[in-house]
Image (tube, rainbow, N blue to C red):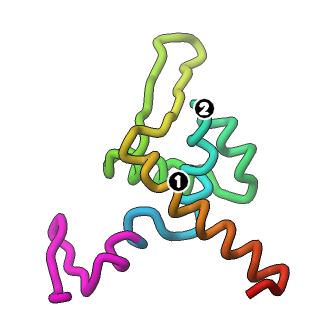
Amino acid sequence: MPRFEFRGKYYNNPVELSLDIIGGKWKMPILWRLKDKSWRYSELKKSIGKITHKMLAQQLKELEEDGLISRKVYASVPPKVEYSIKEKGKTTIPIIDSLRNWGENFKEGKI
């Protein structure tokens, strides 16, 4: 496949683009948690564990900009923000599920 441009960045193949959008240490765990319900920021932070506030905020912002999740702000005191997965984001779940299954099989020596 020839090199292509997407949003001003060049990629050598679609796998590079895919990894740029959902790859890394935190995006797939975030998407996986959002697959079943909406989560508040503090719930995500607590559930994921060692992620920093800066990194979680950055990853959520990138996922929102890419149209995979939505952010809803409630006018309340204290402020309440919930994140949920969008239809486009749901298309990543089978991919993440396959990677989880592969990792589990690899860990158990089945591969």
* Residue displayed at 60% across by 32% down: 37
Q: Amino acid at mark 1?
A: Ile
* Magenta run includes residue 2: yes
Magenta residue span: 1-18
Characterize the local packing of mark 2: few (<14), some (14-19) or many (20 or more) Cα atoms within 10 angstroms. Answer: few
* Residue displayed at 48% across by 69% down: 23
| Residue 22 vertical position relative to residue 103 in the rendered view, above or below | above
Characterize the local packing of mark 1: few (<14), some (14-19) or many (20 or more) Cα atoms within 10 angstroms. Answer: some
In the orientation shown, which residue stands out farthest toward the front? 110
Where's the C terminus, which quadrant?
bottom right
| Residue 71 vertical position relative to residue 27 in the rendered view, above or below | above
In the orientation shown, which residue stands out farthest toward the top? 76
Q: Which residue is mark 2?
A: 37
Q: Which residue occupies the foreground of this view, 105 or 62?
A: 105
Q: Earlier in the sequence, mark 2 or mark 1?
A: 2
Q: Which residue occupies the foreground of this view, 31 or 55?
A: 31
Residue 33: x and y in percent read 63, 45
Residue 91: x and y in percent read 42, 51
* Magenta run includes residue 7: yes
Q: Which residue occupies the foreground of this view, 79 or 68?
A: 68
Residue 58 numbered mark, or none = none
Identify the secondary structure beneath mark 1: helix
> Quadrant of residue 110 in the image?
bottom right
Relative placement, left or right, of 82 versus 91 is right
Q: Which residue is mark 1?
A: 93
Spatial distance from mark 2 to mark 1, Cα to Cα? Answer: 13 Å
Relative placement, left or right, of 5 versus 58 is left
Residue 4: x and y in percent read 15, 79
| Residue 84 vertical position relative to residue 79 in the rendered view, above or below | below
Q: Nearer the viewer, mark 2 or mark 1?
A: 1
Identify the secondary structure beneath mark 2: loop
